[in-house]
Image (tube, grey):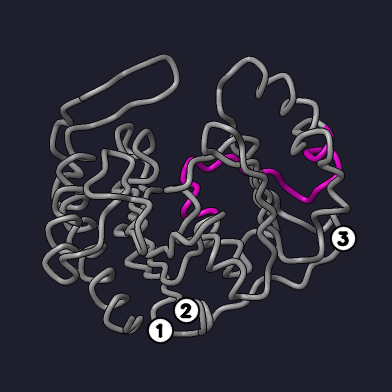
Amino acid sequence: MDLAAVQKAAVAAARAAGKIMRDNWNVPKRVKLDDAHDIKLELDVRCQKTIEKMLLRAFPGIPLLGEEGCSGNINAGHRWVVDPIDGTVNYYFGMPHAAVSIALQATAPGSPISEVGVIYDPFTDELWTVTKNGPTKLNGTPVRVSKRSNVADAVVAMGFSKSRENMEKSIPHLNRIARQAKKIRIMGSAALELAYVASGRLDAYIERTINIWDIAAGGLMVERSGGEMFLKPLPDGRRRMCADNGRLRKKLKLGGLLK
């Protein structure tokens, strides 16, 4: 497959969805789902439909797995993996920290393998791109993970799935790392946190439970910029995850959190 053409199509789709996000920034949002710890907007669906239409026009035979639904056989050959607005809660509450995430994955037996990744932040106009054979780039310029190797010097992001078990497992580690690291950040957009690790802005990012569409693009970016993606598959298809610069995961002592 022509990965340059794949990347070009993904970039165009991400920018189109990002434009929808910007155009609707000051427009009242229509809520599709509002539960105890999350919000889904009609705009999530609209952005995914725009992405799907553009990707299927460019590559008609490739199915799509998205946070807002799937099309085609997502286990056959290749698939798109899409999070149309990663950081919907931030977006809804007027915090400009959200992004579009698009990946192309090969769905060979076993774990799917990302081959192309695109993450677009429409508020900063920052575009991260990567292919399996090339470096991670930010607006066309290669980026690398940080070189910080001491926890005391590190900025570490954490995210939380709100189940009781996850909170009980995560809070002690948050408390410990907050006292050991330079800073802790809870930012609300997995795609951007991974892009930030790949760019050296964050040194590590930890989630006890995370979905495939949150990490499909950003995980490849971390690896291709010199970092490490530790992933443990879960029975429900989600993952335990630590993304770092390749120097910190073992020092963060996360065994009890990620097992």
Spatial CA span between label 3 and label 1: 30 Å
Q: Is residue 191 magenta?
A: yes
> 244 above or below 180?
below
Where disc 2 sits, the SS reads strand
Mark 3 crowdedness (10 Å alpha carbons): few <14, some 14-19, many ≥20: some
Q: Are marks 1 and 2 in contact (CB under 8 Å)?
A: yes
In the image, which disc is placed on residue 150? Answer: 3
Q: Are marks 2 and 3 in contact (CB under 8 Å)?
A: no
Question: Which stretch is magenta?
Answer: 176-193
- Location of mark 2 (residue): 137
In the image, which disc is placed on residue 187? Answer: none
Find residue 103 and report its image quarter.
bottom left
Q: Give the amino acid type for the residue marked by disc 3 in the picture.
A: Asn
Mark 2 crowdedness (10 Å alpha carbons): few <14, some 14-19, many ≥20: many
Spatial CA span between label 1 and label 2: 5 Å
Q: Residue at x 18, y 31 (%)?
A: 29
On screen, residue 95 versus residue 19, left or right, reads right
User: Viewer-proximal residue, 86 or 6?
Assistant: 6
Q: Give the amino acid type for the residue marked by disc 1 in the picture.
A: Gly
Q: Residue at x 23, y 40 (%)?
A: 44
User: Viewer-proximal residue, 164 or 53?
Assistant: 53
Q: Are marks 3 and 1 in contact (CB under 8 Å)?
A: no
Q: Residue at x 65, y 46 (%)?
A: 241
Where disc 1 sits, the SS reads loop
In the image, which disc is placed on residue 140? Answer: 1
Spatial CA span between label 2 and label 3: 26 Å
Q: Give the amino acid type for the residue marked by disc 2 in the picture.
A: Lys
